[in-house]
Image: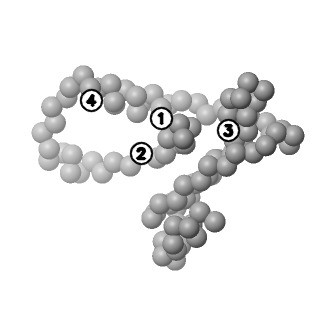
Amino acid sequence: MRKWSKLKRVKVKVGPLLLLQIIWTDKRQKAFDEIKKRMTITLIVAYLIFENPFILYMNASGKDIGAVLYQKDDQDKEYTIACISRALNQHEKNYLIIERNA
């Protein structure tokens, strides 16, 4: 799911990293630049075409849920129609994963 990976939130707790001595390499710089690029890409939302089928990607973790609605154009390229995400409340965190994805 290449499209979904672009939308995942990047969560980093900085505190523990301050205690580490990190050797910055070219490989780490390339990874950092890729993350920075993906976080600054403008999301293009397309118009809904009712004649085309819908594609729905969903994801649920222990803390939040999210979904992205896509459609394909004539060249078979996926376009985002809508996306949504939110944090789970205290009660929803107790749900089974299958219930969070329902």
Q: Give the image location of residue 20, x and y in percent.
A: 14, 44
Q: Earlier in the sequence, mark 3 or mark 1?
A: 1
Residue 37 appears in view: yes
Q: Mark 1 points at which residue?
A: 39
- Please report contact status of discs 3 and 4: CB closer than 8 Å, yes or no: no
Q: Give the image location of residue 87, x and y in percent.
A: 52, 61
Q: Residues within 10 Å of mark 4 (few under 14, many from 20)?
A: few
Q: Which colour scheme is used?
A: one colour
As drawn, 89 above or below 53: below
The amino acid type found where label 2 is placed reads Val
Q: Mark 2 points at which residue?
A: 10
Residue 89 appears in view: no
Q: Name the residue under label 4.
A: 28
Element on which disc 2 rests: loop
Q: How far is the residue under mark 1 from the one under mark 4?
A: 17 Å
Q: How far is the residue under mark 3 from the one under mark 4?
A: 30 Å
Q: Earlier in the sequence, mark 3 or mark 4?
A: 4
Which is more toward the observer, 38 or 70?
70
Would you say 5 lies left or right of 20 here?
right
As drawn, 89 above or below 13: below
- Please report contact status of discs 3 and 1: CB closer than 8 Å, yes or no: no
Q: Earlier in the sequence, mark 1 or mark 4?
A: 4
The mark closer to the camera, 3 or 1, is 3
The amino acid type found where label 4 is placed reads Arg
Q: Name the residue under label 3.
A: 80
Q: In which quarter of the image is the N terminus?
A: top right
